[in-house]
Image (tube, rainbow, N blue to C red):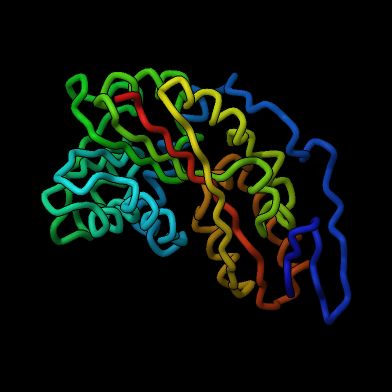
Amino acid sequence: MHCQPSGALLLRNGNVDRLERPPEQGVNRTVSRQNAAWERRLAEQHFANVAPRYEALRETDDDAIVLIGDRLPDRPLVGADIGAGTGRYTELLRKEVPDGTTIIAVDLSHEMLRALTRETYDSPPVVRCETERLPLRTGALDFVTTFNAIHHFDLDAFVDEMARVLRDDGQLFVYTRTPEQNAQSIWGQAFPGFLAHEQRLHSEGTLRSVLGRLGAVESRSFRFPRRATATRLAERVRGGGYSTFSLYDPSMLEDALQAFLTHVDGHEVEWHDENLLVHVRRPG
């Protein structure tokens, strides 16, 4: 079974079935943060619960890491990976940066950072704090990265803090997915209510506009082939592979999963995930 990028399509025995998407699931919208405090509390609870199994539930994409390494100057640097979680991307990044570079892993979740230090032999320095209030001096950092986390931040406050902690000519790298990219995933195309529940993502235009307050902006999209069995996909839903699933009422989530599995019909699924890397360079 293949999930096609042109719409909510499922292939079953060579025949195409179209999954009807409720009107409120469209992607032409402005992300609302009216319930930001509630979203943050829910996210904290979600990551506390999922931390022990998080590594097994998510893919890690190397391509953006290589590009970031190429953009950094060839000298020892000081950087921070914000929203580092269990350190999946932090560890990959440490292999790409110049020798002598220090990367600080920053996250609000004690449980996620504990998993990082437990799983990593030579773990990076870690800081538990809110993203918008970093315990770092002004101009302390040469670069900042954040991977699949910016939709959990107060975007305006985050940009203000980046303006404070990044040095002149410092760089910010934001790896995320847009609402449009989310709609092309297996979850956006075929999992009931997924797009309606996920209202936190920022459009590329919003990211370029808001992050552009810091300096010159460029962006690049990435596309990755994926494949998984129905059993594996169900494990990711029940295990909380995406925080979006925590926004469902538990009984509604199980109902949505059963409808999803009915459409999948036990087949292995192939689809493509898309992500966006936004790169900002501060004026020198």
Figure check: 152 above or below 161: below
Residue 217 in the figure: left or right of residue 260 = left
The quadrant of the rendering that contains the N terminus is: bottom right
- Of residue 90 and residue 66, the one placed in the foreground of this image is 66
Residue 209 spot, x, y in % from top left: 55, 24
At x 68%, y 26%, the residue is 30
Figure check: 121 above or below 2: above
Residue 47 spot, x, y in % from top left: 40, 44
Residue 256 in the figure: left or right of residue 38 = right
At x 34%, y 24%, the residue is 283
At x 55%, y 55%, the residue is 222
Whether residue 42 is visible? no
- Of residue 198 and residue 262, the one placed in the foreground of this image is 198
Count of labels in the image: 0
- Of residue 129 and residue 98, the one placed in the foreground of this image is 98
Whether residue 277 is visible? yes
At x 49%, y 58%, the residue is 239
Residue 259, picture quadrant: bottom right
Which residue ends up furthest to the left in the rendered image?
100
Figure check: 209 above or below 258: above
Residue 198 spot, x, y in % from top left: 63, 39
Residue 263 spot, x, y in % from top left: 78, 67
Which residue ends up furthest to the front in the rendered image?
284
The quadrant of the rendering that contains the C terminus is: top left
